[in-house]
Amino acid sequence: MALITISGFPSSGKSRRAAQIHDFLSSTLQSSTSASSPQLKVKVISDDDVGVHRASYDDSLQEKTARATLFTAITRHIARDTILIVDAMNYIKGFRYQIYCKAREAGVRVATVYILATPDQCSKWNDERSDGKIYKCATLDALIQRFEEPSSMVRWDAPLFTVAWDDPTPPLERIFDAVTTGIVKPPNVGTQITPKAPTDALRTLEHTSNALVSALMAAQAAGPIGGPITLTLDALEPNSNTGVNASSVFGVRLTLPHRSLTLSELQRLKRQFVASRRKAVTLGSTEKGRVDWGEEGVGRAFAEFLEEGLGVGG
């Protein structure tokens, strides 16, 4: 559904604002959702929820681990039936961008709520805490100095809602509209998961391409060939990545030039095809859509490659 990133100085009142947003969204969704509609959830994740203590920010290595712990929780709870509110400082723009990319990958809307308070006000509130969840003075000052302010001009912070420390409530209606009717940005190339080839893809690639070359040479030895032709190839054992197709043979159709083909040119084209596919196996496919790594799929792809290489591709 949506991900709301809360950002602000330490001890600036972020948790209070997160609670206000949570309560408003929950009540509004409950009153506007019919019994037959799927129930949407509103959830808050904070440092306290994932066991991150204020002392974690005293040390850079502990802080890095704390951010990783929070991000893991975000990844686990982000969903299309949930409005997830991340109640933390989120003071590093690179971390906010990482959260934004995860939201795009999950196909949910995003919004950022910036809690604006002065350093003096934050220091005062930190000193007045009675629950023991306080920052050391040096840590508080260092975090404020390193804080990277959200900006509505960058895509990972937009839409941005700024809430001053003395505002009675955040702009709740506008936030609700943003997370329920705003644009869902599609994942970009950097956020998409690269499809992986099956473990026996290289074996299938070598076997099928060699089988097609052998079948071509055998057909040519039996008589003149040219134009459309269907070749029958021997399949690997049934437990290969051909899946449910338990047949021991399969056909490959291609169009050939009206001339004799030499083994050397077929082997050269085969090496080029295998090299291009081997890169896709090791680095991940860059082709649009799903790549068929089964024997019939590899056979069709190699046939098309041969047609183009032999100058008969349409």
Image (cartoon, grey):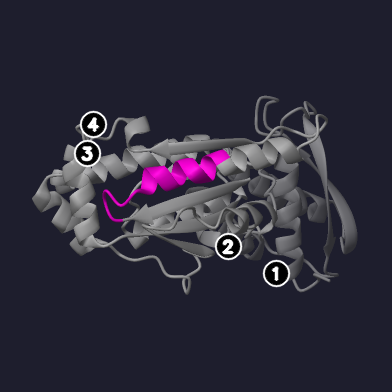
Q: Residues within 10 Å of mark 1 (few under 14, many from 20)?
A: some
Q: Residues within 10 Å of mark 3 (few under 14, many from 20)?
A: few
Q: In the rendered image, which quarter contains the C terminus?
A: bottom right
Res. 14 in view: yes
Name the residue rendered at 23%, 48% in the picture.
Answer: 125
Distance of label 4 from label 1 (alpha carbons) = 74 Å
Q: Which sits earlier in the primary sequence, circle 3 or circle 2? A: 3
Q: Secondary structure at mark 2?
A: helix
Compared to residue 76, the image places residue 275 above or below, namely: below
Q: Which sits earlier in the primary sequence, circle 4 or circle 2? A: 4
Q: Which sits earlier in the primary sequence, circle 3 or circle 1? A: 3
Name the residue rendered at 66%, 59% in the picture.
Answer: 182
Specify the segment rendered in magenta: 9-23
Q: Residue furthest left?
A: 138
Rendering coords of residue 155 (x, y %): 51, 68
State the residue position of label 4. 131
Q: Main secondary structure of the magenta part?
A: helix
Confirm or deny contact between disc 3 and disc 4 (CB under 8 A).
yes
Q: What number is the disc on residue 129?
A: 3
State the residue position of label 1. 309
Res. 283 in view: no
Q: What number is the disc on residue 272?
A: 2
Specify whether residue 251 is painted magenta: no
Distance of label 3 from label 2 (alpha carbons) = 68 Å
Confirm or deny contact between disc 2 and disc 1 (CB under 8 A).
yes
Compared to residue 282, the image places residue 276 above or below, namely: below
